[in-house]
Image: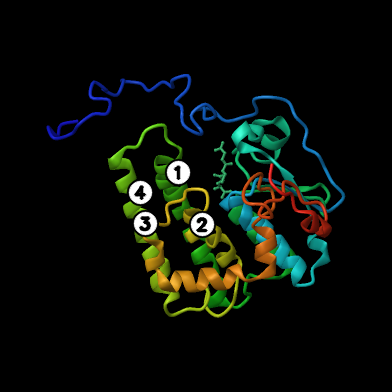
Amino acid sequence: MTDSKVQNQPADYVPAKVWSPKNNYGGTFGSINRPVSGARFEKELPVGKHPLQLYSQGTPNGQKITIMLEELLAAGHPGAEYDAWLIDIFKGAQFGSGFVGINPNGKIPALVDHSTDPVTRVFESGSILVHLAERFGAFLPTEGRARTETFNWLMWQMGSAPFVGGGLGHFYAYAPLKIEYAIDRYAMETKRQLHVLDTHLATHEFLAGDQYTIADMAVWPWYPGSLYGVYNTHEFLAVEEYTHLLRWYRAIATRPAVARGRVVNRVAGEPGTFLRERHDAKDFESIQQGE
Ligand SMILES: N[C@@H](CCC(=O)N[C@@H](CS)C(=O)NCC(=O)O)C(=O)O
């Protein structure tokens, strides 16, 4: 720190020569995070009756996959029937041995595809979307330019959303203290990303062009889904100003498969907006009425 204008927070804070963690940082994830990976306790994963077993929670990354699975079923792919088991990340369920066995990164969502022998584990939401799109030949164009555009926006989403979730969302909604510099930094970047999407969608119906693809399914729960939802920052970021993005967002929201997929593995919310687990299409008829 050579800049004399730099102010430390707390004022007497000086970074140690070698960092070491505190016991508990407070805030929403302060007692959950650790600087090591791996399982923290033994727990096998349940396995249901369908070939596709999803282990997830209805966060924006989880919603991407349940939206895709519901879209596949709606498009006439009965092989996409799935069991969606809840991994409650706020209670540390992502650190069970069974879950870490299928995702060494210890984060939802993760999928096990039992249609292969041996079974195929799939982690990282972008990888899961590509796996399902290729397996069913759907929502991923086969033609060169549209296919590349789909991957362009899918990879854009995977690289960009951590600034929204781990950056703005964390410091605005989850951190135990409000730090103006941190919130400003990530608000700036999140608004820049919203502008990227708004500008592109001014001249394109969907992200990859005229076809609805896995790129739309990856971006939709985050932009602006997460800003209205988990992080409640839509007013703070003046999301209503991004009219082309909202045109696209609202059009996709009317799709019945999206309405179903977005509620799966959610544990709370307004009555009718969450379904802890999904094992059968009929489960949507008996959606839980609050907890
Ligand atoms: N790049 C990963 C990110 C997954 C991720 O960050 N998942 C979050 C929920 S949205 C999680 O499991 N957090 C729990 C934790 O960090 O312990 C993906 O897209 O699948």
Residue 90 x, y percent position in the rendering: 59, 35
**Which element carries disc 1, helix, strand or loop?**
helix
Q: Position of residue 277 (x, y in %)?
A: 75, 47
Please report whichever mark, 4 or 3, sits nearer to the chain's N-terminal start: 4
Q: Which mark is residue 166?
A: 1
- SS of the residue under disc 2: helix
Q: Is mark 1 within 8 Å of ligand 1?
A: yes
Q: Gap in Å between the C-alphas at discs 3 and 2?
A: 14 Å
**Is residue 43 in sight in this rendering?**
yes
Question: Image point 52% across, 53% down: which residue?
Answer: 229
Task: For label 1, count other residues whose C-alpha is less than 10 Å away and answer few (under 14), some (14-19) or many (20+).
Answer: few
Residue labelled 4 has its Cβ within 8 Å of some atom of ligand 1: no
Count all numbered tags in the image, as a single digit: 4
Instruction: Look at label 4 and name its amino acid.
Output: Tyr
Q: Quadrant of residue 251?
A: bottom right
Which residue is under mark 4? Answer: 186
Name the residue type under label 1.
Answer: Gly
Amino acid at dot 2 = Trp
Question: Distance from label 4 to label 3 (Cα)?
Answer: 11 Å
Please give the residue where the numbered disc 3 appears in the rendered image. Answer: 237
Q: Are marks 2 and 1 in contact (CB under 8 Å)?
A: no
Colouring mode (rainbow / by chain / secondary structure / one colour): rainbow
Is disc 3 surrounded by few (<14), some (14 to 19) or many (20+) residues within 10 Å? some
Look at the picture and state if 260 lies above or below 201: above
Question: Amino acid under label 3?
Answer: Leu
Q: Which residue is mark 2?
A: 222
Do tag 3 and tag 2 residues touch (Cβ < 8 Å)? no
Q: Secondary structure at mark 3?
A: loop
